[in-house]
Image: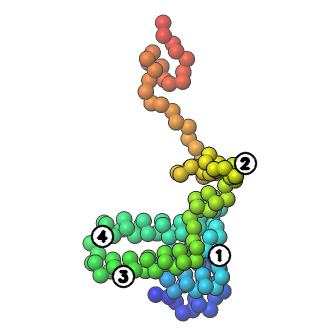
Amino acid sequence: MGNAGCFESTPSIEGLRAAVDTMDPDEVKFHLEGGVDVNEAIDDHGNTVYDLYDVRYKAFQEEMSLARAGSEMRESEEARFMQVVGLLRKHGAKHRRAKEREQAPTSPGGGSSFGNSPARGAIPPGYPVTPYLPTTPSPSGSPPGSPDRSP
């Protein structure tokens, strides 16, 4: 599982990220118990190690659905994933979106913050957006958005 040499290092967000990336429960525990903030951003988009865990777990599930690996191997790997997510949750890990919702301003007067929090599936700030262009031609046969050239 863990590499004894790694335990000589100082706990860090980089080390935690690497431990989650390799699904090493011993290393994850080392960094979390060493005081690393489990919700610190690990990239410029504000993703956390919990987001990284989700990506790795989804890839694992897809790989296992395609592979003919024995159930013993799958169970062993699944146990590692469950240990890692258990440690992350124990230390209060949150996904990027959950952190954004918590930081969203509430409406004046203490009412509901409905409308002020990012929508589920919202496009993150700075994400390039391609406008939607309908593909159905207009009745005149001209491309959508072009002036009608009917006789």
Q: Dot 4 surroundings within 10 Å: few (below 14), some, or many (20 or more)?
A: few
Q: Dot 3 surroundings within 10 Å: few (below 14), some, or many (20 or more)?
A: few
Q: Which residue is mark 2?
A: 108
Q: Which residue is mark 3?
A: 76
Residue 79: image location, x then y, percent? 40, 80
Q: Nearer the viewer, mark 3 or mark 4?
A: 3
| Residue 136 at least partly seen | yes
Residue at horizontal 65 percent and vertical 70 percent from the top: 40
How far is mark 4 from mark 2, CA to CA? 54 Å
Q: Secondary structure at mark 2?
A: helix
Residue 25: image location, x then y, percent? 49, 83
Q: Which mark is residue 104?
A: none
How far is mark 4 from mark 1, CA to CA? 36 Å
Q: Dot 1 surroundings within 10 Å: few (below 14), some, or many (20 or more)?
A: some
Q: Which residue is mark 4?
A: 67
Residue at horizontal 48 percent and vertical 10 percent from the top: 150
Residue 31: image location, x then y, percent? 60, 83
Tell me which label, 2 or 1, sits earlier in the chain.
Answer: 1
**Amino acid beneath label 2:** Pro
